[in-house]
């Protein structure tokens, strides 16, 4: 009953609970130093089960482990009373632990220690409790002695053979067997129930046996108890009456009830009798059986392994056969022992902080929550209430805690099905600030990335943290900086100017601590030329680019993946700095290739797909159909395109009359056709084949089709290329292109030719020939003729051709052009004039006036010229022709003449003309070299032009500074014609220049030669610098590397690049001067290594291949194959043989020696049992040697009575240092002593079988 004002107090407490709900305790870091210094109440780490069943043959161990600072001390209660461990000699407690160990070596009964135990772990800050541990000793009682009368039943009747196993702890596992140790066969008719009884739905005559035996196996003691067997006699009848089902289990009414706890296994059983045997079906009222339900034992058992509240309800089993059916309802009620909703957790608080402990549990019925402090109940209405804590329902609220109020709180949630117990300590901690991270860290980040500088710290009360940069200014917070509660400083976008040293300072009332972090901002690692998707023809080379730009201070590695798996380079694939090359690609190379470049702080990837294309496969299964006089249908099946679509199909044919075996193109068809009509020629015996064409090329031809013969006809075609032209000035040759073989259309092809002079009215002259030309003789020079042509065969004439005009032969022109002269002479061109010839003197077809000219010499002294004769044609029929001759060389002496030309001949030459071209601008200088030999200056060299085109007056050099796309002011230097070198001093080594050089004559400046200065550090050449004599001396996991070079000592660095042959991975290591030790290699691996200059990457050594040695593994030696061992065994065998011979001789001579009488050892019966009727689950047979087997030299097994030891001279059998025997065998032990240690009785085979059950 609430005291007065109780509702008001509850309201206030609820409000406080809401206010403190967001408060959280201090999270103590896992820092080892802090954990060592941290004072904390005890925490239970390990304990025994609540229901603890032990084996009576073993010592009893009750576990209780706890941690805390100071180390906890332990005490126990037994059955609610203090348990004095020190007074019981059998009970000991482990050091630095509360675990009890009860030993029975000196006697005692485990049953005397059964009871309820609870462990208490205490230190200066509180006490933690274990659960109440109920200790019980496992029991395997004997089966009660009983005499079982034979069971007599009629055939078709139902029967239950009761098992009633003895109640063990834990309960035994039951099973039925016969005397042959075989399990009783179970089925829909015969089965064992959950209680162990054997149920017969109906008995058959074959069930008559005398050995139905129920067995109980006890798990803890590993023993099996066997009940006396039942004898079943079945009385047979001529006809068994059919009966409706009735339930053997459950018995009684048509419904029953069952209660099960949440999380336990639910098993419902329905076994029915009847003839014929009934079948069992299960239902749940209000819904279907869920997936958790399993049906066992031929549907007679419904099982749910872990029950929950939704599994409650009414379950129905129905048994039916062809006579009738019966139902039984089982009402399942699910209760629950307490289970956690919110388990209380440990709190570490600073002084004056507030927080709460929550303990929420559920169950059915609702559990009762009780709080304890250090193992004692905490009453709400204490006579001395604690004003800094209050209990509201299942929550304890702490207000402004103080040092000294640390304690361990226990929450106990219980109902009549069980209980839960949880420990949660409240520790009040005060500690000066401490830095938890590494001191003076170096953090490298990528430019423009979001960056966090961590400064983990701890203190109680929670320290205030501030950040400073370079030890100056106020705290960093705001703008691009943000400080988080865990001490991290966020830089939203790191820039180069953000580099520097950052200091974090943590302070509270107990002191302050600081740490520094140095930040370096790096350029990002980027792939500037990524691999691109490409298609490669099989057998060619594929190349993927992967050019990288990165921060020069960050080493990078470039790796390649194929289809997201590491790419094995092997001997074929080649990788360099900027690309991956795949020579002789094949189908297995197809896939997605990924270039990954990594630095220590970032990476970039780019992918591209390689598609391998190839010639298409040839078409298949050619078939001809639909024949006609001049056509036929051809059909085929296309082959594989190999990633390159077929663009067309080419149909070829072969005929066996004119060109047998020669395949010719017939026609082409688009890729979407594979059945076409072929247009054919007459009088041809065809055979066809098809070729597929894609972007790679042509496939192999298909297999030929069957042949098809067309009938003959007169020619359809007119011969092409008909012309008439004289080969001499007195003839005319008429020629044409002969018809193709497939155009002849029949046998005996010949041609009829007609000709006559044009415009004379002559009759046609004609001739018939089988050739492809005819010559008309005795013609006049260059006169026109009319000509026509016709093809004929045995089937008739073909069509006539059109009439064409031909000419008889030409002759040499008889007159030259006259009055050849020039005008308007310039440096590179001149106008040419002449008087034309009479057209009748050309004596043929006029082609052109042909001008021959050549360079006679240069007006520059000492310059040699090429006097090769050149020509230029002018076609003109005007009365006063003129032309322009161009492309002349300035400042030169030229000579020329002209002829008239027809189609075959040049006429006589005209008069010769000399002229001189004017001065021009010079050509480019012969060369222009820009060499930077030192960082302070640039050296320029050039040479005079090959063609000065006049008198050189000097050179002009213009230059300007360049920086990317920006250029500086243009500067100029002039030089005399005899100056060909200049040295330019550099005001700044980082500046690059662009130069423009031109030569001059009096006319002006010539062509400009342009060049840029090289970058001295990266692009300049290093003339004469080489690396040679690379030597590698490998070991198992390292190699000594040396080389020679002529770089300046102390001014150069090198890169060691080594490639693992196994997977193609490439690594690079910066080094200084040789020799060096290359460590971290893989044992037994093959590598390729080269050295190149870090400054001039193109200067490299040759590649050296080496292999590390395998790790030393001592050979495993088979002792049986060693000579010394074989010899030793032979010596032992020889000594034994000699002893046997000596014994045999003594016997044969009648010597006296003691021989004991041999006694036959009795054998146990098949069904031997212990005195209590049980079988030992661990048979004694496990510890006995086989009878008649030889004993070990230790003498641990009983020796035979007739042992050779009787004949020895006494003493232990020993080996000498050389391996020979000292003495022979050990002296025979006293028989009584031996028999006291070992039993020679044979083990029962029944026990051996049960040990396997």
Image: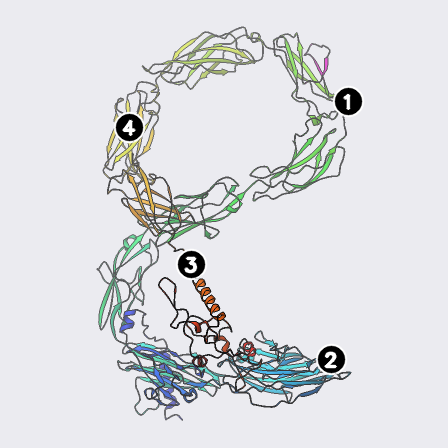
Label 4 secondary element? strand
User: Mark 1–mark 3 contact, CB under 8 Å?
Assistant: no
Question: Which comes before the other along the chain, label 3 or label 2?
Answer: 2
Point out the tag, 1 or 4, that comes first from the N-terminus: 1
State whether residue 567 is above or below residue 132: above
237 sits to left or right of 1060: right
Quarter of the picture holding the N terminus: bottom left
Q: Secondary structure at mark 2?
A: loop
Do the residues under discs 4 and 2 have CB atoms within 8 angstroms? no
Give neighbour class at mark 1: few <14, some 14-19, many 20+ (Cα, 10 Å). some
Was residue 862 drawn as part of the magenta stretch in this picture? no
All told, the count of numbered labels is 4
- Looking at marks 4 and 2 on the same chain, the residue that comes earlier in the sequence is marked by 2
Q: Position of residue 774 (x, y in %)?
A: 67, 14
N-term-proximal mark, 3 vs 4:
4
Give the number of the disc on residue 1127: 3
Instruction: For marks 3 and 4, give the CA distance.
Output: 91 Å
**N-terminal label among 1 and 3:** 1
Residue picked out by circle 2 = 322
Query: Could you say which disc has been placed on residue 941 in the image?
Result: 4
Measure the alpha-carbon separation of dots 4 and 2: 118 Å
Q: Crowding near pointer 3: few (<14 within 10 Å), some, many (20+)?
A: few
Residue 144, relative to residue 1026: is it above or below?
below
Residue 26 image offset from top left, x and y in percent: 32, 74
Q: Which portion, as a residue range, is magenta? A: 752-771
- Up/down of 491 relative to 1039, above or below: below
In three-dimensional space, the C-alpha distance between marks 1 and 4, rounded to whole angstroms, equals 84 Å
């Amino acid at each position: 009953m609430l005291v007065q004002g109780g509702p008001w107090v509850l309201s206030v407490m609820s409000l406080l609970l809401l206010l403190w709900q967001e408060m959280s305790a201090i999270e103590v870091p896992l820092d080892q130093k802090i954990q060592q210094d941290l004072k904390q109440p005890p925490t239970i780490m390990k304990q025994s089960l609540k229901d603890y069943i032990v084996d009576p043959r073993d010592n009893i161990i009750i576990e209780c482990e706890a941690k805390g600072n100071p180390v906890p001390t332990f005490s126990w209660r037994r059955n609610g009373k203090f348990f004095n461990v020190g007074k019981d000699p059998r009970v000991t407690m482990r050091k630095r632990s509360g675990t009890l160990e009860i030993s029975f070596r000196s006697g005692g009964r485990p049953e005397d220690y059964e009871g309820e135990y609870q462990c208490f772990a205490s230190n200066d800050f509180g006490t933690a409790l274990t659960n109440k541990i109920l200790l019980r000793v496992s029991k395997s009682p004997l089966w009660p002695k009983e005499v079982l009368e034979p069971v007599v039943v009629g055939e078709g009747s139902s029967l239950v053979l009761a098992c009633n196993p003895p109640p063990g702890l834990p309960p035994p596992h039951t099973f039925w067997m016969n005397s042959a140790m075989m399990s009783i066969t179970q089925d829909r008719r015969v089965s064992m129930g959950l209680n162990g009884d054997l149920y017969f739905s109906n008995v058959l005559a074959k069930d008559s046996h005398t050995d139905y035996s129920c067995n109980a196996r006890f798990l803890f003691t590993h023993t099996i108890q066997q009940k006396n067997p039942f004898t079943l006699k079945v009385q047979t009848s001529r006809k068994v009456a059919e009966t409706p089902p009735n339930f053997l289990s459950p018995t009684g009414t048509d419904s029953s009830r069952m209660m099960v706890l949440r999380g336990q296994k639910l098993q419902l059983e329905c076994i029915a009798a009847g003839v014929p045997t009934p079948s069992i079906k299960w239902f749940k009222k209000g819904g279907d059986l869920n997936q958790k339900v399993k049906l066992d034992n031929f549907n007679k058992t419904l099982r749910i392994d872990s029950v929950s509240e939704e599994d409650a309800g009414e379950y129905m089993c129905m048994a039916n056969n062809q006579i009738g059916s019966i139902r039984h309802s089982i009402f399942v009620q699910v209760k629950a022992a307490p289970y956690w909703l919110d388990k209380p957790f440990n709190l570490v608080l600073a002084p004056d902080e507030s927080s709460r402990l929550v303990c929420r549990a559920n169950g059915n019925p609702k559990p009762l929550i009780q709080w304890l402090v250090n193992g004692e109940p905490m009453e709400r209405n204490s006579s001395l209430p604690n004003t800094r804590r209050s209990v509201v329902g299942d929550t304890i609220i702490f207000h402004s805690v103080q040092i000294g109020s640390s304690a361990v709180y226990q929450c106990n949630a219980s109902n009549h099905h069980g209980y839960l117990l949880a420990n949660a300590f409240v520790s009040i901690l005060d500690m000066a600030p401490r830095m938890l991270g590494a001191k003076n860290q170096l953090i490298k980040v990528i430019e423009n990335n979001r960056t966090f500088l961590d400064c983990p710290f701890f203190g109680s009360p929670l320290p205030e943290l501030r950040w400073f940069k370079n030890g100056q200014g106020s705290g960093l917070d705001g703008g691009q900086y943000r400080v988080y509660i865990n001490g991290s400083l966020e830089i939203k976008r790191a820039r180069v100017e953000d580099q520097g040293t950052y200091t974090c300072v943590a302070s509270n009332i107990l002191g302050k601590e600081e740490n520094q972090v140095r930040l370096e901002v790096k350029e990002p690692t980027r792939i500037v030329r990524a691999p691109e998707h490409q298609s490669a023809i099989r057998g060619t080379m594929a190349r993927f680019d992967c050019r990288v730009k990165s921060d020069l201070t960050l080493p990078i590695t470039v790796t390649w993946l194929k289809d997201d798996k590491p790419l094995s380079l092997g001997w074929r694939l080649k990788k360099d700095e900027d690309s991956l090359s795949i020579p002789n690609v094949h189908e297995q190379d197809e896939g997605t290739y990924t270039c990954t470049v990594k630095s220590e702080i970032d990476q970039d990837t780019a992918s591209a797909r390689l598609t391998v294309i190839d010639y298409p496969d040839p078409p298949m299964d050619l078939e001809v159909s639909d024949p006609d006089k001049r056509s036929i249908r051809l059909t085929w099946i296309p082959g594989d395109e190999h990633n390159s679509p077929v663009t067309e199909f080419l149909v070829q044919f072969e005929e066996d009359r004119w060109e047998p075996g020669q395949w010719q193109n017939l026609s082409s068809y688009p890729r979407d056709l594979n059945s076409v009509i072929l247009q054919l020629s007459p009088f041809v015996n065809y055979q066809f084949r098809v070729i597929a064409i894609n972007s790679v090329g042509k496939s192999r031809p298909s297999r030929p089709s069957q042949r098809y013969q067309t009938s003959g006809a007169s020619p359809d075609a007119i011969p092409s290329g008909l012309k008439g032209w004289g080969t001499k000035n007195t003839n005319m040759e008429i020629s044409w292109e002969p018809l193709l073989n497939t155009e002849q259309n029949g046998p005996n092809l010949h041609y009829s030719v007609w000709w006559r002079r044009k415009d004379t009215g002559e009759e046609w002259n004609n001739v018939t020939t089988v050739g492809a030309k005819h010559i008309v003789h005795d013609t006049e020079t260059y006169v026109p003729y009319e000509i026509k042509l016709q093809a004929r065969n045995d089937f008739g004439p073909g069509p006539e051709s059109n009439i064409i005009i031909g000419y008889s032969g030409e002759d040499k022109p008889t007159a030259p052009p006259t009055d050849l002269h020039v005008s308007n002479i310039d440096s590179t061109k001149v106008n040419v004039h002449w008087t034309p010839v009479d057209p009748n003197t050309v004596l043929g077809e006029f082609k052109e006036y042909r001008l021959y000219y050549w360079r006679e010499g240069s007006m520059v002294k000492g310059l040699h010229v090429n006097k090769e004769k050149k020509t230029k044609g002018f076609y003109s029929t005007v009365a006063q022709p003129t032309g322009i001759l161009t492309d002349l060389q300035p400042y030169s002496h030229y000579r020329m003449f002209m002829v008239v030309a027809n189609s075959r001949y040049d006429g006589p030459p005209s008069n010769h003309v000399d002229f001189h071209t004017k001065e021009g601008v010079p050509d480019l200088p012969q060369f222009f070299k820009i060499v930077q030999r030192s960082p302070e200056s640039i050296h320029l060299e050039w040479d005079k032009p090959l063609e000065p085109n006049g008198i050189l007056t000097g050179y002009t050099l213009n230059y300007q500074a360049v920086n990317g796309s920006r250029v500086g002011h243009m500067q100029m230097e002039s030089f005399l014609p005899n100056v060909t070198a200049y040295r330019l001093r550099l005001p700044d080594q980082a500046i690059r220049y662009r130069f423009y050089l031109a030569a001059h004559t009096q006319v002006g400046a010539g062509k400009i030669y342009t060049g840029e200065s090289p970058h001295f550090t990266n692009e300049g050449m290093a003339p004469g610098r080489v690396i040679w004599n690379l030597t590698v001396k490998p070991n198992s996991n390292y190699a000594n590397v040396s080389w020679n070079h002529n770089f300046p000592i102390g001014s150069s660095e090198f890169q060691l690049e080594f490639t693992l042959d196994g997977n193609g991975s490439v690594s690079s290591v910066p080094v200084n001067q040789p020799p060096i030790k290359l460590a971290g290699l893989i044992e037994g691996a093959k590598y390729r290594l080269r050295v190149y200059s870090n400054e001039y990457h193109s200067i490299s050594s040759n590649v050296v291949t080496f292999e590390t040695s395998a790790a030393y593994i001592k050979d495993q030696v088979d002792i049986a194959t060693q000579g010394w061992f074989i010899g030793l065994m032979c010596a032992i065998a020889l000594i034994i043989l000699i002893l046997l011979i000596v014994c045999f001789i003594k016997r044969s001579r009648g010597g006296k020696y003691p021989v004991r009488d041999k006694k036959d050892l009795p054998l146990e019966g098949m069904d031997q049992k212990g005195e209590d009727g049980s079988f030992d689950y661990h048979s004694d047979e496990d510890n006995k040697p086989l009878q008649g087997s030889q004993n070990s030299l230790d003498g641990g097994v009983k020796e035979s009575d007739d042992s050779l030891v009787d004949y020895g001279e006494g003493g232990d059998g020993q080996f000498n240092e050389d391996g020979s025997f000292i003495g022979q065998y050990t002296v025979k032990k006293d028989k009584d002593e031996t028999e006291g240690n070992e039993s020679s009785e044979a083990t029962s085979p029944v026990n051996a079988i049960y040990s396997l059950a």
